Image (tube, helix red, strand yellow):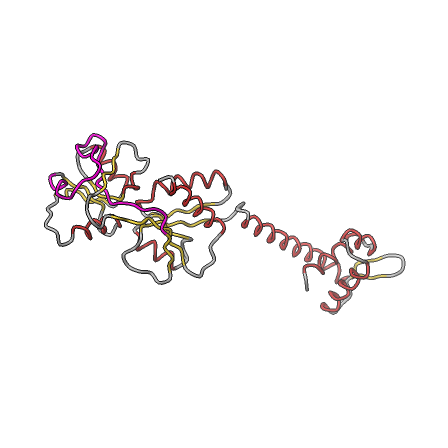
Amino acid sequence: MEIRQLKYFLRAAETLNFSVAAKELFVTQSTLSQQILNLEQELNQPLLERNPHNVMLTEGGRMLLPLAKRIVSDAEICKQQLLDLKDLKSGELNIGVTFSFSSIAGETMLQFLNRYPNVKINVQYAPMSELMEKLVKHDLDFVLAFRPSARYSNINSEVLFKNRLSAIVNEFHPLAKQQTVTFKELECYDFALPSRGLQARHAFEKIVDGKKYSFRVKVEINYIHLLFRLIRNTQYVTVLSETTVLNENGLRAVPLDEPGNDMDGCIHTLKNTYLKNSAKEFIKMLRQAAELL
């Protein structure tokens, strides 16, 4: 049973005239008759009673009529929804974002929603390791995070922008006007650091590992906005990537003058997996935004 056959049957059943139905369907009358005959043979019973004067529905035809209408309607709805999905008029997008990417993700999301208001976006903020696990399980369409230290064989990591680990201070802090800062200079300040397990903290500890620095860590926080609030209202120093404070009023990023402070901001996607059109478009906007950083 084909959708085309059901459409032909419906038109013939509604017009009760093969000639009129054929014209409305833009097919020959012989084609219409043959397709309905094929349908009757498959169902092993007549659907339309034909004679030289008129056409009438059989008992089987009357039973099939509402079912055929529903099937053809559902097929059209399915087709339209898939076309809408292709044209980004519907659908959902699931994005994983580490805290350092809040600003660029937020700006791009506003642009995307303005252009495609009917696509629902689900954003999950979490440490990179947790987001990568969700990506592998297909719970996320892509992840925004720095390049991981461990290699994921089934994940593509496309560099979005180059970044540096930086000392983050408020605009009135003694370090705020410096172009760079060394760890030696930071030893005299109190620290409020992102919690262990977060990417910036891992990068910081990797750089200082084995070196004889003594830092006064007073606070550890796993919530970035609370960390920002603390830095804005104290003379504490934190260490994050410089893009973390992009568009954050009252905060300054002073790059670390230390080897190994480079951090590549990446878009992570699964290898050999279908990528939604909405994900492709969002990633395209991210690339455009990254060019302005």
Q: Is residue 13 shown to the viewer in this render?
A: no
Left or right: residue 75 compared with residue 222: right
Name the residue: 46% across, 41% down. 112
| 118 vs 128: above or below | above
Q: Position of residue 261 (x, y in %)?
A: 23, 48
Between residues 29 and 268, which one lies in front from this camera angle?
268
Q: Is residue 248 left or right of residue 2?
A: left
Work out whether residue 36 can be spotted. Answer: yes
Quadrant where the image shows the N terminus: bottom right
Tell me where residue 99 appears, x and y as whole percent: 31, 45
Residue 182 locus on image (x, y percent): 16, 42
Residues drawn in magenta: 159-188
Q: Is residue 169 above or below residue 154?
A: above
Q: Is residue 86 magenta?
A: no
Tell me if residue 178 comes above or below residue 257 in the rendering: above
Q: Nearer the viewer, residue 54 or 217?
A: 217
The residue at 46%/40% (across/down) is 113
Please give the name of the residue rendered at 82% of the width and 56% of the height, measured from the top-left corner: 18
Q: Quadrant of the C terminus?
A: top left
Extreme-top residue of the structure: 172
Q: How many marks?
A: 0
Q: Position of residue 128 (x, y in %)?
A: 31, 52
In front here: 41 or 146?
146
**The quarter of the displayed image where residue 240 is located:** top left
